[in-house]
Amino acid sequence: MSSSGGPKDPILLKSSMTKKPHRAAAPMIAVDRGSEKPLHRQIYDAFRAMILDRRLESGQQIPSTRALADELGISRIPVLDAYAQLLAEGYIESRSGAGTFVKRSLSDQFPSVRPTARSVLSHPGNEAISRLARLLPVERTPWFPSSGAFSVGQIAYDHFPFRVWSDLVTRHVRKVRVSSMNYADPMGSKEFREVIAVYLRTARAVRCDASQIMIVSGSQHALDLSARVLLESDIPVWIEEPGYELLRHTLLLSGCRLVPVPVDSEGLDVAAGMSLCRIARAAFVTPSHQYPLGATMSAARRLQLLEWAHRHNAWIVEDDYDSEYRYESMPVASMQGLDPGLRVIYIGTFSKTLFPSLRLGYIVIPPPLIAHFLAVRRANDLFPSHLYQAALADFIEAGHFTRHIRKTRQLYAERRNALAQALRKEFGSEIEILGAEAGMHLVVTLPPGHSDQKIAARAAQDGLWLWPLSTAYNGPSVRQGFILGFGGTRAADMLHQVRRLRKAIRESGNDA
Ligand SMILES: Cc1ncc(COP(=O)(O)O)c(C=O)c1O
């Protein structure tokens, strides 16, 4: 401990080492001239730490700037800067003629009990959020990092028109205008909504105009906004069983009561829903391609569900997340288009047709609910970011979007065929393949006695991310299996990846 070391040595100072008597004892501060941290910051940090640790007490006098600079053997300027900052943040106060003191009122603000991790977590706030937080750690869901052969929702990055897209984005970055930097319409850009309205009326048979379309950051955001508009605590809501796991999470946050309604080869079983809970506020459904099992909701069921909604003043939330990809027939028309009575909230996304990090999707809102959605949006994130809306509007208008869908539809059909063939070759009739007619994933079910989560945990150790089917069930899992994405894997690699799946099953102590 020395104050006479070379310029790089820390200078340590103690009250006992002071040369001149001071009214205020100089606290023990180490400053290091060789450090990258500026001197004023070192002094500020030292005082702040001592005050917060209560080594310097409220009301205690601290040395004058001149005295401290003398003690430390440095110029007065860094000391003045440090004191000015401490003063501005309310740690110290100066009393004219008396000196500088640790702020007296600080002692009232210190918590009387020192928090520990355990005491903090004993009151973690919202109970539903705490429950979700406990479900999500990676140790419990090792398949979640998911970017690999069977990742659900992976697109064909190798066929994305990067050049066209980056030219469009660059053009919009270069021509920034004040209007594109300012606060904007909570519904989203008008030009973009008009382009989407044309697309939805033409390609998805949705009844809409641009004034009903709200741009959101993907369908997850749309589901969340819909839940906030429609739901309240303890209100019953129909969901598909099995269904989309993150929809359940969103709904749980609203405090509503989930009513899991079984699905079969015709989609949601409306009669079963009515016998479970006839009167519910809403039904959240995926009629074009039921997630995850893949059924297309039959016309009879669609009409039955609409009839139920009208009779009981319930809402239908149609999550049309991947309907552009259908392989054996034309895309199935939306359910919203069947309903003349404004009971369907229609949700779509560009995550599958383009790429998920775009975070762009849309809600087609029944006109009587537009004000409600606007109110929630204003309280939520105000409005969507401008740049990608503008670039995507141009991308669609110039015909790139339809061209890309046409191209990828063929590509995904090849990848799906390759996956189905490889599964048949490796597993024969021991597994069942479901939902391969549409979308970018299919489901394989395993014979009884298998644990899909155990297998997925084993596979994750080898970097193979498998999404267990059982996680899609709200209640006890009826079937075990995997939701296998095929969009991001080349047809030529499929057999190799399926062999890895087979190996993971074998090594986890199961053999299909
Ligand atoms: C059924 C379903 N709904 C919603 C989403 C959310 O998609 P995004 O928020 O990326 O648009 C997904 C994503 O995979 C999905 O599978």
Image (cartoon, rainbow, N blue to C red):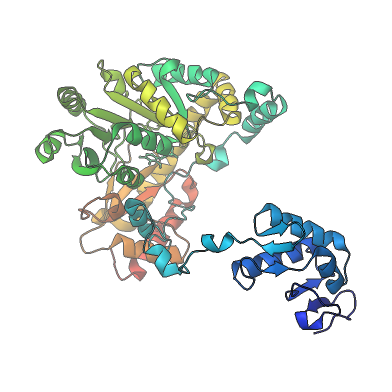
- Image quadrant holding the C terminus, namely bottom left
Query: In front: 248, or 285?
Result: 248
For the view shown, which residue lies furthest in the left direction?
A: 275
Please provide percent x and percent y for residue 80: 81, 58
Please provide percent x and percent y for residue 322: 39, 34
Q: Please determine whether, in this image, residue 200 is positioned above or below residue 230.
A: above
In the rendered structure, the answer to whether residue 473 lies left or right of residue 199 reads left
Please provide percent x and percent y for residue 383: 51, 29
In the rendered structure, the answer to whether residue 116 lies left or right of residue 239 reads right
Q: Please determine whether, in this image, residue 507 is positioned above or below residue 256.
A: below
Please provide percent x and percent y for residue 286: 30, 35
* Residue at horizontal 62 percent and vertical 31 percent from the top: 165
* Residue at horizontal 56 percent and vertical 24 percent from the top: 184
Residue 424, visible in the rendered structure: no
- Which quadrant of the view contains residue 283? top left
- Which quadrant of the view contains residue 427? bottom left
* Residue at horizontal 56 percent and vertical 27 percent from the top: 389
- Which quadrant of the view contains residue 79? bottom right
Residue 67, visible in the rendered structure: yes
- Looking at the rendering, the quadrant in which ligand 1 lies is top left
- Image quadrant holding the N terminus, namely bottom right
Q: Please determine whether, in this image, residue 294 is positioned above or below residue 52.
A: above
